[in-house]
Amino acid sequence: MNGGEVKEVEAPAEPLEWRFSQVFGERTAGEEVQEVDIISAIEFDKTGDHLATGDRGGRVVLFERTDKRDHGGYRRDLEMMDHPVRTHPEFRYKTEFQSHEPEFDYLKSLEIEEKINKIRWCQTANNALFLLSTNDKTIKFWKIQEKKVKKICDMNIDPSRATGNGNPACSIVKPYVTNGGCADRSYGYLSKDFSFPAGSFAALHFPTVVHSNETSLSARCRRIYAHAHDYHINSISNNSDGETFISADDLRINLWNLEISNQSFNIVDVKPTNMEDLTEVITSAEFHPTHCNMLAYSSSKGSIRLIDLRQSALCDGHAKLFEGMEAPNSKSFFTEIIASISDIKFGKDGRYILSRDYMNLKLWDINMDSGPVATFQVHEYLRPKLCDLYENDSIFDKFECCLSGDGTRVATGSYSNLFRVFGCTAGSTEATTLEASKNPMRRQAPAPSRPRSLSTFARVGRRGPESPAVDANGNAFDLSTKLLHLAWHPTENSLACAAANSLYMYFA
């Protein structure tokens, strides 16, 4: 009508069918998992070609993508083919290094664990990889680079006749002095095993060092950012300017320059004058993906604050506050505990923020602070058992969340090594439950028959299982096996999940 263009409403995407791709560190039945081997952090880089994991033993393990490299030489041929070639990301072990060691703070009589809390990739340069890793107190900046192996050649002696310490002039069973000679021989003594080359001293020459075709990966700590946090670090996040990053603990957020390790700026401080007045703590913080002046942080009260660094040096105020509305008469002893947000993530374009509290995933539009645009129930069947979860401390487990690169789906973990994938486009009813195993769909729960109506007040769509007796799959849930950490590939529908010491990868 009126010559205007009619805009067609896009139908929601079909639910993805997830398939097993790879597993690293798979344990056999009955094998006991060592505490130090449990994965505690996982992160893809921006290209999706590298994946890093950290564990409770302070190690960082790197994986690199192999399928792109295999097809790289045939890219033009593949583009000219009539049908697309379907591939999924395949990774292989690249290297590992010890990032943190256990320490002891003698001033506070506090033991500092080596456990890696977070890993964040930085911009690459000169074919080298850079990343930040942190434990409870110390952040480290690492450079990982391939180097050609150097070898020594043109030796004056036959290596086969040299002794164990490389000194042919004396036997290895003799005691040695500091200059490498033999203690019971005169200075000019030479073993019979040694012979001058033809031409005597004139033919002696310095050995030369040459670069071989062999390469080895080396990880070098470039900088250490320490002594800036009184409380445990829960988050680090890179800025889009490529020069700065933030670190957050329970009460403060600090801003760092990657090149300066002995100075940081405190930009958020929620510590009250009297600690008895403390009502909430910072639980997670993240920079906006494109605006270098904006960042968001979440609190233990279930709120998210968006702050603008241009407003003031100390951002005690906030540009926007996002809070969920609790239904009246629904408060209980556990209300504030389960409302605490354990993780937040910005979408790729920065328009949406995904948050995870103990029971739900919530999607927030930064342009609408009246409430979340969607709420996804992760394990509603646990609600009647909150008292038991409180008694065994499971109610304080901190689950991470992630968004797909195109922003159409979100994912998070649960108990019994399960993780859930939800569609977040308008009209989508996708609510998939998968298990971290080689057969992820074997415990698949049926999706709801029809979408639930949106709340007119906050436009909140709630989806998920509601059976109070069993888990999402009709099975007894296992609190000892929990999937806390997972990451979504930045450009493809591929998920990496950490189940204890095993890294599972899936594609759709």
Image (spheres, helix red, strand yellow):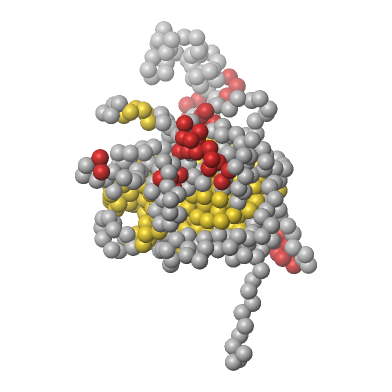
In this rendering, position of residue 265 left or right of residue 54 = left
Residue name at image x 39 percent, y 14 percent: 177
Q: Nearer the viewer, residue 62 or 135?
A: 135
Q: Residue at x 59, y 66 (%)?
A: 426
Q: Position of residue 337 (x, y in %)?
A: 42, 42
Q: In this view of the protein, which residue sits in the foreground, 61 or 418?
A: 418
Q: State which quadrant residue 114 falls in.
A: top left
Q: Is residue 44 left or right of residue 266?
A: right
Is residue 347 visible from the viewing direction of this image? Answer: no
Q: Where is 480 relative to 284, above or below? A: above
Q: Residue at x 29, y 58 (%)?
A: 317
In the image, is 156 to the left or to the right of 445? Answer: left
Instruction: Spot the residue most to the front.
Output: 329
How far across and how far down the image is residue 180, in percent? 42, 18
- Please name the residue shown 64% across and 77% down the image: 8
- Residue extending farthest to the top is 184
Q: Position of residue 219 (x, y in %)?
A: 48, 40
In the depicted view, which residue is nearer to us: 124 or 53?
53
Q: Is residue 421 above or below residue 351?
A: above
Q: Position of residue 332 (x, y in %)?
A: 43, 44
Determine the residue located farthest toward the bottom in the rendered image: 2
Above or below, comparing residue 64 to residue 159 in the picture: below
Q: Is residue 357 visible?
A: yes
Tell me the quarter of the image containing the N terminus. Answer: bottom right
The number of numbered badges drawn on the structure is: 0
In the visual, does 257 lie left or right of 90?
A: left
Instruction: Kindly give the residue lying farthest to the right in the view shown.
Output: 82
